Amino acid sequence: MADIDIPPHLIELERAAWAEQQAGALTFATADAVQAAYREHAKATDGVGRLELEMAVKKLVRHPEG
C-alpha cells in the first residue's frame, strides 16, 4: 500500500467506530460519519481512492503493530 496522507480526524473517527463495534453498539450515525469523512478526504486527495484510504485507516487503527 502506498504512503497515504491520513488526517488525525479520520483516525479518531475510525477509533470511535471500532470501539462501538467492539462493544456491539455501532450506531448508524457513527458509521455514516466515518464513511462521509472517507468520501470527502478521498475526493479532496488526488489519486487516493476511498477504499484504499479506508483500508489504510482501518489497518492503522485495528492493527497498529503492523
Image (cartoon, rainbow, N blue to C red):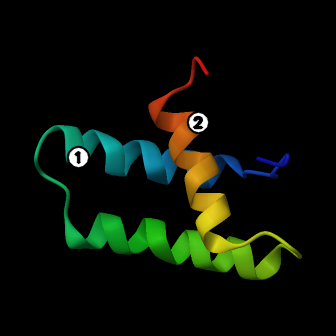
Q: Amino acid at mark 1?
A: Glu
Q: Earlier in the sequence, mark 2 or mark 1?
A: 1
Q: Residues within 10 Å of mark 2 (few under 14, many from 20)?
A: some
Q: In the image, 44: left or right of 46?
A: left
Among all residues in the image, which is located at the extreme top?
Answer: 65
Among all residues in the image, which is located at the extreme left?
Answer: 24
Front-most of residues 49 and 44: 49
Residue 20 - label = 1
In this rendering, the answer to whether 63 lies above or below 8 is above
**Residue position marked by numbered label 2 in the rendering:** 60
Q: Position of residue 24 (x, y in %)?
A: 10, 46
- Which residue corresponds to the image point at 71% horizontal and 74% vertical from the top-left? 42
Residue 62 - label = none
Front-most of residues 59 and 18: 59
Q: In the image, 64: left or right of 48?
A: left
Q: Position of residue 22 (x, y in %)?
A: 20, 38
Mark closer to the observer (2, 1): 2
Q: In the image, 17: left or right of 7?
A: left
Question: What SS does tag 1 mark?
Answer: helix
Q: Residues within 10 Å of mark 1 (few under 14, many from 20)?
A: some
Q: Amino acid at mark 2?
A: Leu
Q: What distance separates the C-alpha of mark 2 from that of mark 1?
A: 17 Å
Q: Position of residue 18 (x, y in %)?
A: 33, 44
- Which residue corresponds to the image point at 34% horizontal and 51% vertical from the top-left? 17
Question: What SS does tag 2 mark?
Answer: helix
Front-most of residues 26 and 1: 1
For residue 26, what is the image quadrant? bottom left
- Which residue corresponds to the image point at 45% horizontal and 34% vertical from the top-left? 62
- Which residue corresponds to the image point at 81% horizontal and 51% vertical from the top-left? 4
Q: Position of residue 60 (x, y in %)?
A: 58, 36
